[in-house]
Image (tube, rainbow, N blue to C red):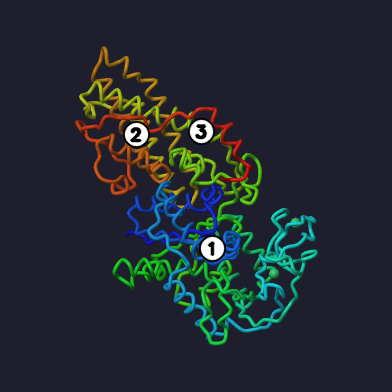
Amino acid sequence: MSERILVCVAWPYANGPLHLGQIAGAYLPADIFARYHRLKGNEVLMVSGSDQHGTPITIKAEQEGKTPGEIAARYHQHFLESWQQLGISFDLFTTTGTPNHAAVTQDIFLALRDKGYIYQATVSQPFCPQCQRFLPDRYVEGTCPHCQSPGARGDQCDECGKPLNPIELIEYRCGLCSTTPVFKDSEHFFLKLSAFNDRLLTWVKEKNHWRPNVLNFTKRYLEEGLKDRAITRDIDWGVPVPLDGFADKRIYVWFEAVIGYLSATKEWAKSSGDEGKWCNFWQGNEAKSYYFIGKDNIPFHTLIWPAMLIGYGGLNLPYDVPANEFLTIEGRKLSSSRNWAVWLPDYLARYDPDPLRYLLSINMPETGDTDFSWREFVRRNNDELVATYGNLVNRVLTFVYKNFDGCVPACDDIDASGKELIGKSDAAFVTMDNLLSHCNFKQALKMAMYIAHEANRYLDEKSPWKVIKEDRQAAANSLFVAICIITRLKTMLYPFLPFSSQKLHEFLGFEGRVEDDGWQPHAPLPGQKLLPPEPLFSKLDDSLVEEETARLGHASS
Ligand SMILES: [Zn+2]
Ligand SMILES: [Zn+2]
């Protein structure tokens, strides 16, 4: 029986281009997982969207003299292009700016308030007497009390990474006009997180399939005890509070962005013509939800969103939250503000998508931080994609195409080493199935590459290019085995390398999409017509290492 898999992916702020840290952290693992489940024949829904409402967007808009809506629309368009080019296969990538999202958010807000999980209280907020406005935390600047860095913001210090409150900053000032803000009372709504602490503890205790870092982090929070959190603020950009007297306040972005998973599912159902279909992914035991996020986002997905769902009632809580650790760049912490980052559109303008997908998968920060370096990118591309997998495919298909009239040769006997290799590939399907369904992507990819390596070894041993001169049938037999393995590799590698798998699918003479043939060890039919093969990957020149590393840390164009 097929399962229903909801693949939820972090919502990026629409205030700048995507970088490789975000891709390795959330988007690529989510896509691998979704593609794998589609191959399995499961019902998959993969959703996310641009977060249009955070202060990162209003700040960018003020810097550029644009409206936040213009900034958000620009980057949303960039995101859609990046997904297309990198092959991140969303079923829906929407935005938090839709009327549907506002309606779903307001419904949850009102339901939680009716049940007593949202209450009103007065808080003291920074107010700029010059700008005549309340200042969101990020708009307050000053010196960090922990590391003395002069450019810290009221929510966090970028230098030492510590979270901050505006009042903790030394010599705090308005980020817009540098006036010293005063603190004024303001009426706000709070989510009563403390009411969910025990229920979340009970829920988390059963989550032994979670990654240890995610589980431990979550338990630690709960053992310290959750504190109630303000869910509205004094700002005019965001989802309106659905009550009279709060026209100058909006729902806080951290509260509404997580609701996006639900609102996106509803939007998808509506546009599919079957409005009620969203329930399939949110209710019942046969629906499982997975949340792909970076580790900085863990508390929102293992504590806050589950608390909101418990409070609202009747909807499934996350089944798994396979959060990834961080990707460093050339040994240093990624920093957008210092341009110590590799931007996805820049990468995609110069290179193919699959080599990046390969490197970020084989080096995925699943259980600890990993590093991206251009040298490693070139090495993995040349030694593994080109020399191991690409070369296997290319030498077999080119030789068969030339010597067997462009068709899969007929095989009359598979010898012991051929049977052994096929047996290994069968076993790899089973192992990879288990690894992929448990979100162990790195190990799964290594398994597939091991099969490619073994196939090369088999061919070296059989040397059909020599044997064909004396015994054409013996050469045909070993080439048939090699073609079987290649056929399996295009399925195994499809979640990771969708573009080259589809190409290979066509070279092998299969029709339609790889995905439609399912997750199983296929074999081509003898006599099956091949297409003229071309190399799947190209060798990269070492000189790009220097060129690319020279771009790091300089102002972007
Ligand atoms: Zn600091
Ligand atoms: Zn000001």
* Residue highlighted by disc 3: 380
Q: Amino acid at mark 2?
A: Ile
Residue situated in front as seen by the camera: 279 or 257: 257
- Is the CB–ligand 1 distance for label 2 below 8 Å? no
Q: Amino acid at mark 3?
A: Arg
Distance from Cα at disc 2 to Cα at disc 3: 20 Å
Judge the density around disc 1: few (<14), some (14-19), many (≥20) Cα neighbours within 10 Å. Answer: few
Quarter holding the N terminus? bottom left
**Is 249 on the left or on the right of 358, as rendered?**
right
Residue 134: x %, y % from top left: 66, 75
Q: Please report the residue visible at 45 percent of the width from the left and 71 percent of the height from the top.
A: 101
Residue 304: x %, y % from top left: 57, 69
**Is 267 on the left or on the right of 331, as rendered?**
left
For discs 2 and 3, the disc positioned in front in the rendered view: 3
**Is 107 on the left or on the right of 232, as rendered?**
left
Residue 467: x %, y % from top left: 30, 15
Q: Amino acid at mark 1?
A: Lys
288 versus 312 height, above or below: above
